[in-house]
Image (cartoon, grey):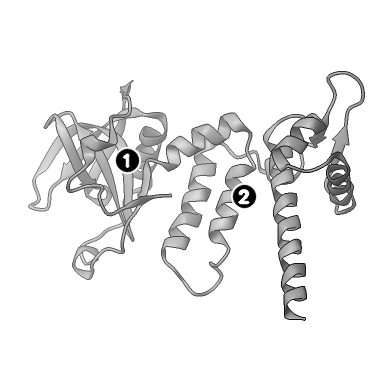
Amino acid sequence: MWHIRLMISTSFEQRTERRNRLVGLLRSEEHWKTSDLREHLGVSQRTLMRELAELRCAGYPIESDRGRGGGIRLNGRWGIERLTLNHQEVVELILSLAVMESLKSPLLTSNLNAIKQKLFQAFPQKQRSAVSNIRKRIMIGDNASANVISNYTTPAQQISESIAESFLGQNCLEIEYQSESGEITLRVIEAQYILLNWPIWYIIAWDHLRLSPRLFRIDRIKSASIVDSSFQLRQKGTFSGNYTPFYKTI
């Protein structure tokens, strides 16, 4: 009897996964031909029509266009798109989920990775590509040590906003930076990557003053302003060594 239950459970999970994939596909493009949907899902026309009918019954606003050039589509105003999130808001939301996931809390975090992936898949391909590139530049490490946290102060909102704008827009950033010894220097940097060792944020940057990669604690930045020049992403190997070996991107 147990093997029958296992087969039923497996079949249900497969159908659920297929249905989730179908919704993701419908949301990724303005419209689909049924032949293309069948090819992506590896199902028959009959199975596809059944899945679409069941989604309609479940409340999904699936529409069909008749005639040449028509297709199947999911109403673009449905679901998360009502939020009209911009790229920065999307990245901040995905990052928040990734941070919570990295904390490995035993409560209310078991589905965070699935939620993160579904959120990512909910956006059209051109937006998905842009968000994916940004995700690769955000890294999560271990929690900061008690000694490091002891002298941590929350960065000012204006500084945090300038850093975020510089990072997302790939604009150079002029900062006043206070070293561990208390010395303050004026630098222009390229915010190539950002790193979280909870709760301490760092910028892994190319430093125009030293003409080399440097790691900056965000809470030691005393002022920050966008410079009217952009930068290109450098090869990740440029920042290897002391900066990136033990961290994972979100």
Q: Closer to the camera: disc 1 or disc 2?
A: 2
Residue projecting furthest to the bottom = 1
Q: Is residue 250 left or right of residue 228?
A: right
The kind of residue on which mark 1 rests is: Tyr
Q: Which residue is mark 1?
A: 193
- Please provide percent x and percent y for residue 119: 60, 48
Q: Quadrant of the N terminus?
A: bottom right
Location of residue 133 (image quadrant): top left
Q: Looking at this view, is 186 or 56 the one in front? A: 56
Q: Is residue 177 left or right of residue 47?
A: left
Q: In the image, what residue occupies the spot 38% across and 45% down?
A: 138
Q: Earlier in the sequence, mark 1 or mark 2?
A: 2
Residue projecting furthest to the top = 68
Q: Which residue is mark 2?
A: 118
Q: Residues within 10 Å of mark 1 (few under 14, many from 20)?
A: many
Q: Is residue 206 left or right of residue 25?
A: left
Under tag 1, what secondary structure? strand
Q: Is residue 118 left or right of residue 79?
A: left
Q: Residues within 10 Å of mark 2 (few under 14, many from 20)?
A: some
The mark found on residue 241 in the picture is none
- Please provide percent x and percent y for residue 156: 33, 49
Residue 76 can be seen in this image: no
Under tag 2, what secondary structure? helix
- Please provide percent x and percent y for residue 214: 18, 40
Residue 152 can be seen in this image: yes
Location of residue 232 (image quadrant): top left
